[in-house]
Image: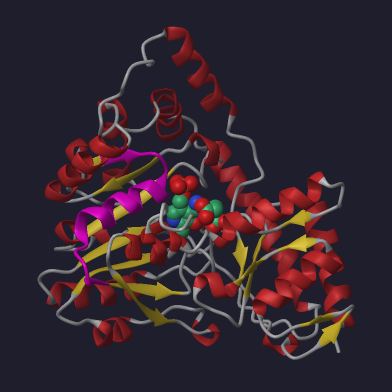
Amino acid sequence: MNSILSDRIINMEESATLAMAKKARELKSQGIDIISLSLGEPDFKTPKHIQEAAKAAIDEGKYFSYPPVAGYQDLREAIAKKLREENQIADAKAENIVVSTGAKHSIANVFMCMINEGDEVIIFSPYWVSYAEIIKLAGGVPVLIEGTLENNFKATAAQLEAAITPRTKAVIYSSPCNPTGSVFSKEELEAIAAVILKHDNIMVIADEIYELINFVGKNYSIGSFPGMFDRTITVNGFSKGYAMTGWRVGYICAPLFIAKAVEKMQGQFTSGGTGIAQRAALAGISGDQTPSKEMAEAYFRRRALVLDLLQDIPGIKTHVPEGAFYFFPDVTAFFGKSAHGHTIKDADDLCLYLLDIANVSLVTGAAFGAPECVRLSYAASDEELVEALKRIKKALGDLA
Ligand code: PMP
Ligand code: GLU
């Protein structure tokens, strides 16, 4: 059968986040009481006014045909306005915006449009699972620069500079970061921008999908810094800040030649994002922002709750995340230990052990470029979090 499938798909890693979520769902359907802290997905419902906008759009009957490939004009204008006013990306215009089927699709479009065989893309690591696979799919070579727990997992501008070669095409990071929750400060981003501006043909992809879940105050967009508009592709979407994962709406803001290329690519692949979902997204971006703020406050509260519980588990080492909804603790203290017929060699084993013995699903840090860690999503109710951490503490305590 292998000859039917392409090398492309055979060599591609499955998304570890989605694979773990699938496993947890399967065990739940067998009646096992699994607490799933693996998937990075808000546990809130899409705000009511956004739901209503989608219903109204259906009733209007105007949005059943193919939408424009780059997205509805009014949505592109609303996104550009938001980027100008809230992110200080002064040059953002509707023509720079391309709406896609989720930010994951936006990122795939961008890499498919920019990468030639053998081009290198520097990834700030730990990094979100899909970056490396999408880069490889496009024929590129991911080059990791690694942050450590001691510096809040943030690789530096100096590391970036050292990793640049004549083949470097782009640099990608997320801030707030999935999986670490770290947020780049203005100074850190200025230092990164200074490195980029020294090199003519390198673009930055700034993944800002968690921008509304930021506990340290302001989110800085590198695309707003002097000289950086032409060198930046800002990626964002509605999944996290508006609890709209299933609606599948994301976007880029990019220099015109890239926006045009992405539109062309999308014209051959999907013909553009879903019409009704775009109407919902428009209500999200231009309507009442209170629900998004309330969700961010809930994550902030839960961060304190989980931090307390994690710090109470001997062997767990964690930093304090500044945004998103993940903890990314170091779990090396448990490597080499055994219990209940399991021996823990690495973070993969630890996740399987916790799934089996504590019935809690996490994701191995190996999927994010940090095999000494695990990722815990706290986008779950307080009750689930308290119970999950109690079970994790007990199961880890059994390891000897
Ligand atoms: N970037 C990051 C860092 C993410 O965590 C996610 C999560 N899904 C995405 C992009 C893609 O988001 P979506 O496709 O749901 O818009
Ligand atoms: N971004 C989320 C996560 O990291 C959702 C799953 C995915 O798209 O990979 O868990």
Please name the colour scheme applied to the rendered image: secondary structure
Q: Tell me, yes or no, if residue 80 can be seen here.
A: no
Q: Is residue 99 magenta?
A: yes
Residue interval drawn in magenta: 98-120
Q: Give the residue displayed 21% in from the left and 67% down from the top.
A: 117
Expressed as whole percent of the image width and height from the top left, the position of residue 17 reads: 58, 59
Expressed as whole percent of the image width and height from the top left, the position of residue 48 reads: 59, 26
- The image shows residue 369, relative to residue 9, as above or below, that is below
Q: Nearer the viewer, residue 385 or 368?
A: 368
Left or right: 358 as drawn, with respect to 351? right
Q: Nearer the viewer, residue 246 or 327?
A: 246
Q: Tell me, yes or no, if residue 216 can be seen here.
A: yes
Residue 267 occupies which quadrant of the picture?
Answer: top left
Left or right: 217 as drawn, with respect to 117? right
Q: Quadrant of the C terminus?
A: bottom right
Q: Give the residue displayed 70% in from the left and 58% down from the top.
A: 37
Q: Give the residue displayed 43% in from the left and 23% down from the top.
A: 276
Residue 11 occupies which quadrant of the picture?
Answer: bottom left
Left or right: 375 as drawn, with respect to 237? right
